[in-house]
Image: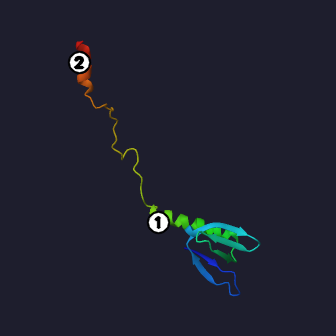
């Protein structure tokens, strides 16, 4: 949730789910259009709203991928190359072809 300030006499604080935002207009007040077809007038600038959404999304990713998560290095990975097969034994197919 992002914290915004409703355009009113008291500029009351409210929290909005950024996934609901469809558009942000500046006319000259900032109008946030939601997917619920509601429009919310806020005192925050469009740039501030965008920065809040970006920070919120970054925090979601930061929580999903912890900073202390260590990727396996090449020396840690036990990978080997294998030949692909076509469903037949290549050794037998070669020996059968050589008999003809």
**Which of the numbered marks, if any, corresponds to residue 86?**
none
Q: Secondary structure at mark 1?
A: helix
Q: Is residue 36 above or below residue 100?
A: below
Q: Which residue bears the numbered disc 2?
A: 96
- Quadrant of residue 100 in the image? top left
Instruction: Return the residue at label 1.
Output: 63
Given the current orientation, which residue lies at the most extreme top position? 100
State the residue lying farthest toward the bottom: 10
In terms of depth relative to the viewer, which is nearer, 51 or 9? 9
96 lies above or below 86: above
Is 61 left or right of 93, judged from the image as shown? right
Q: Do tag 2 and tag 1 residues touch (Cβ < 8 Å)?
A: no
**Rendered location of residue 5, percent (x, y):** 65, 79
Could you say which is closer to the camera, residue 60 or residue 41? 41
Farthest-out residue, front: 37
The residue that appears at 26% across and 16% down in the rendered structure is: 97
Query: Which one is closest to the eye, mark 2 or mark 1?
Result: 2
Quadrant position of residue 64: bottom left
* Left or right placement of residue 12 versus residue 85 in this view: right
Q: Alpha-carbon neighbours of circle 2 within 10 Å: few (<14), some, or many (≥20)?
A: few
């Amino acid at each position: 949730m992002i914290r915004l300030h409703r355009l009113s006499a008291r500029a009351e604080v409210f929290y909005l789910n950024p996934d609901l935002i469809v558009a942000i207009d500046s006319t000259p007040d900032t109008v946030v259009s939601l997917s619920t077809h509601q429009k919310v007038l806020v005192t925050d600038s469009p740039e501030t709203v965008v920065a809040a959404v970006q920070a919120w999304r970054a925090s979601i990713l930061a929580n999903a991928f912890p900073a202390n998560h260590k990727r396996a290095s090449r020396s840690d990975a036990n990978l080997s190359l294998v030949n692909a097969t076509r469903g037949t034994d290549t050794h037998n197919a070669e020996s059968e072809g050589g008999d003809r």
